[in-house]
Amino acid sequence: MTDQIARNEKQLGAILRRARKHAGLTQGTLGDHIHLRQGTVSRLETGEPAVQLRTLMAALSALDLELVVRPRSKASAADIEDMF
Amino acid sequence: MTDQIARNEKQLGAILRRARKHAGLTQGTLGDHIHLRQGTVSRLETGEPAVQLRTLMAALSALDLELVVRPRSKASAADIEDMF
DNA sequence: CCGCTTTATACGCGAACGCGCATATTTTGG
DNA sequence: CCAAAATATGCGCGTTCGCGTATAAAGCGG
């Protein structure tokens, strides 16, 4: 599995969705764990730019994920992918 | 420089602050670049959980940074650090 | 093909955003 | 030590959060 790079909200949401499914959870059950409504998880995953950081961090922690911040690597596939 | 791991808003804010200073920018000038008030950048850096994702992504892109999402590694120094 | 599950949206609500603007407080160099 | 710069914080405003709740629209299994 290659790196999960996110340069915008949509990419981030997509990563989270993959991770959640990989963990065998629904938006509803994930939401239960972290006290977020299913609808809120939905907004996060669809890449709403206005969701709050706390929502993201809660989801990450529930999925046992962490963030790494690093300098942008060269034009990566991640950009092109997301261009369409 | 070791990995910049963030498991909560505060860690993320701290990382951003370091990166901004490293880039030789003030909150104000950074804000100008991405059309955010200096006060908003301040809230982001101080780890306000309720800042929006768009604010984070804007800052990241202005600093030429990207996010990587990955499974949590073992109990790392990053946690303990942030415990105080 | 057809239910059932899952996901996307919508309403009203209280709270907080980020805005422009202004200012207290802290940090910094000389 | 002190002025200038940088950062944190406050107000009113319009907007949008996430909430509870509900429902429409996809997805999926049999």
Image: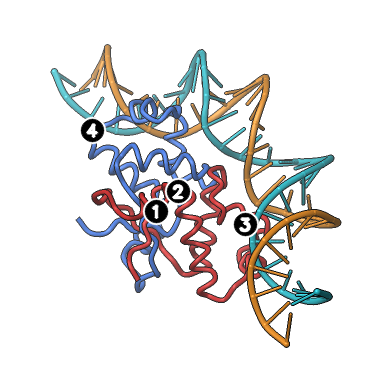
Chain colours: A red, B blue, C cyan, D orange
Amino acid, disc 1: Glu
Q: Which mark is residue A42?
A: 3
| Alpha-carbon span between mark 2 and mark 4 | 34 Å
Q: Earlier in the sequence, mark 3 or mark 1?
A: 3
Residue, disc 2:
A84
Q: Secondary structure at mark 1?
A: helix
Closest to the camera, between mark 3 and mark 1, is 1
Residue, disc 1:
A81
| Alpha-carbon span between mark 4 and mark 3 | 38 Å
Do the residues indicated by labels 3 and 1 lie within the same chain of the protein?
yes
Q: Chain of mark 3?
A: A
Q: Chain of mark 4?
A: B
Residue D9 in the image, given as x and y percentages of width and height: 51, 31
Labels 2 and 4 touching (C-beta < 8 A): no
Residue depicted at x 52% and y 75%? A23
Q: Does residue B24 sit above or below A63 in this rendering?
A: above
Residue C26 in the image, given as x and y percentages of width and height: 36, 32
Do the residues indicated by labels 2 and 4 lie within the same chain of the protein?
no
Q: Chain of mark 1?
A: A
Labels 1 and 2 touching (C-beta < 8 A): yes
Residue A25 in the image, given as x and y percentages of width and height: 59, 73
Residue, disc 4:
B24
Amino acid, disc 4: Gly
Residue depicted at x 36% and y 54%? A78
| Alpha-carbon span between mark 1 and mark 2 | 7 Å
The N terminus of chain A lies in which quarter of the figure? bottom left
Q: Secondary structure at mark 4?
A: loop
| Alpha-carbon span between mark 3 and mark 1 | 21 Å
Do the residues indicated by labels 1 and 2 lie within the same chain of the protein?
yes
| Alpha-carbon span between mark 4 and mark 1 | 32 Å
Q: Secondary structure at mark 3?
A: helix
